[in-house]
Amino acid sequence: MKYPIAIVVGALILGGFYSYTEHEKQLSIERQAQMQIDQENHLKELEQEQKTSEANIREKCSTYLDRNGNYLVSNDTLNTNYNACLHANGL
């Protein structure tokens, strides 16, 4: 009778370890998936901030050119001045 009890206890112990490792695997997969989602969301936020920043710089340059009488110059000069302003502001 000792051997069947030992087999059952051994099977329960092995089953418990197996169940625990499977549970840990699942948690790890879920953590990785959440990290990937968080990273993608962070990248989207950075892209949106960059677009907003670019739009602000373009508006700033347009306003600067309008206020400084650049509407009186030729289109080529205006484009040159606008591009110089964008370049000076990192675009």
Image: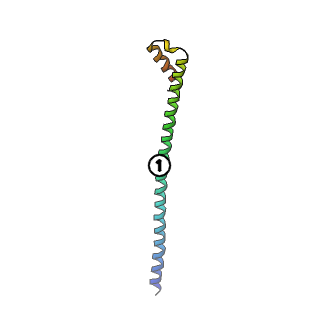
Front in this rendered view, residue 26 or 54: 54
Mark 1 lies on a secondary structure that is: helix
Give the residue type at disc 1: Ile
Foreground residue among 83 and 12: 83
Residue 19 seen in the figure: yes
**Residue 65 image position (x, y, % from top left):** 52, 18
> Where does residue 41 sit, x and y in percent of width and height?
49, 45
- Residue carrying label 1: 37
Q: Compared with residue 35, is residue 76 higher up or lower down, i.e. above or below?
A: above
* Front one among 12 and 32: 32
Residue at (47, 81) in percent of width and height = 6
The residue located at (49%, 37%) in the rendering is 48
Color scheme of the displayed model? rainbow
> Which residue appears at 50% of the width and 23% of the height?
86
Q: Residues within 10 Å of mark 1 (few under 14, many from 20)?
A: few
**Residue drawn at (53%, 29%), measured in percent from left and top?**
56
